[in-house]
Amino acid sequence: MTNDESKRFEIRLSGAGGQGLMLAGKLLAEAASVYDGLNAVQTQSYGPEARGGKSKTDVVISSGEIDYPKATRVNVLLAMSQPALDEYEPSLREDGMLVVDSQLVDRVERDGAIGIPFTMLAIEECGRKLFANVVALGAIGELTKAVTWASLRSAVLARVPKGTEQVNEKALNVGRDAAKRVLEGRGDG
Amino acid sequence: MTNDESKRFEIRLSGAGGQGLMLAGKLLAEAASVYDGLNAVQTQSYGPEARGGKSKTDVVISSGEIDYPKATRVNVLLAMSQPALDEYEPSLREDGMLVVDSQLVDRVERDGAIGIPFTMLAIEECGRKLFANVVALGAIGELTKAVTWASLRSAVLARVPKGTEQVNEKALNVGRDAAKRVLEGRGDG
């Protein structure tokens, strides 16, 4: 947890349909709850705001009870597409962390946004773009420390189809390493 | 919608892990939003309440905005296992509808509960128990009219793996027919 003010931590994963963000949210929520012993609630909204090819899931993590599952002051926003960034950037706290797929997002207004080419890394390092969600998850894990690395790894390996454990673990590590390079470049790492 | 007091309708799908309830909730939410033009929010909780093999997802459907996505006064509870029924029955409104898998739930306290052997029907009519979630969805659709049948069918057919459209449509119809028999038996149909 990077948020000392409150035990509540809100992560919004957004992008286009088909990028596997719902699964990423589920894995994050399971890492937090099943493996780290925290509480987690995952929410998806359908309807006007979710239309136009945008996809979004929110994960609220807390060491306390989660009375209000809707994300209202997002601590971390992942944007895997330009329309998702444009739509959800205003929901991010002023001191929040913005993480974008740097190959799929062209215009970023916010200072300090972190750009990592998740989809390109998935294709180049793991052979298929469908691993971009797990690459992103590895980066989010490293950047936020919202869940422990061991828990994130366990949650991913417990859920992915048999026979794909190795490539998914690689995807997770590719994301973590990319995040580490960003942090080192900033002098935070 | 069977609820005239409010535009808000809460459906809680509960059972054991592996019964496909998350997907059922997603299909219901998509039927409501993408195809019926309503708003829908789906929520999953992880943590103490979700442990012990229980699985639960809530779908809130409304023609208006959904400010509070947490289900607080559940209109319809589907229970596909005894532990799920025991845990979530208290969340059901007094005038709410309880629907249980009659082969997997043994003790039901509430008068007027609707029992349908979803899993048995899935095995006998569709060849595999993994269709039990879609059988249940067909029944919920018929019993609640929370979404139109055309929308439910479209949502299911758009999401299921290619090549399984026919058996999934059959599962949906098996659920609807079972629900119709219940309603006819009660003189509601």
Image (cartoon, coloured by chain):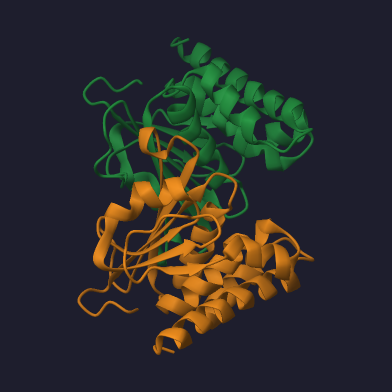
Chain colours: A orange, B green
Q: Quadrant of the N terminus of chain A?
A: bottom left
| Count of numbered circles on the image | 0
Q: What percent of the width, then of the height, locates residue B84?
A: 47, 51
Give A103 or A94, whichever is nearer the viewer: A103
Residue drawn at 59 percent across, 23 percent down:
B153
Direction from residue B83 to residue B4 in the image, left or right = left
Residue at point 52%, 83% (across, down): A181
Left-right relation of A177 to B90: right
Tell me the quarter of the picture where residue B7 sits.
top left
Q: Which image quadrant for residue A134?
A: bottom right
Please report the residue visible at 29 percent of the width from the left and 23 percent of the height from the top. Answer: B3
- Vertical order, B17 against A96 (above or below): above
Residue B126 falls in image quadrant: top right
**Image height check: is A135 above or below A22?**
below
Residue B105 seen anywhere in this rendered image of the structure: no
Could you say where residue B147 lies in the image, as x and y percent from the top left? Answer: 45, 23
Residue B130 relative to residue A100: left or right? right
Residue at coordinates 39% horizontally, 64% vertically from top-left?
A: A40
Q: Nearer the viewer, residue A51 or B29?
A: A51
* Residue A112 visible (yes or no): yes
Tell me residue A5's x, y (percent). Answer: 20, 77
Residue A137 vertical position relative to residue B186 in the rendered view, above or below: below
Quarter placement of the C terminus of chain A: bottom left
Picture coordinates of residue B48, whole percent (x, y): 40, 67
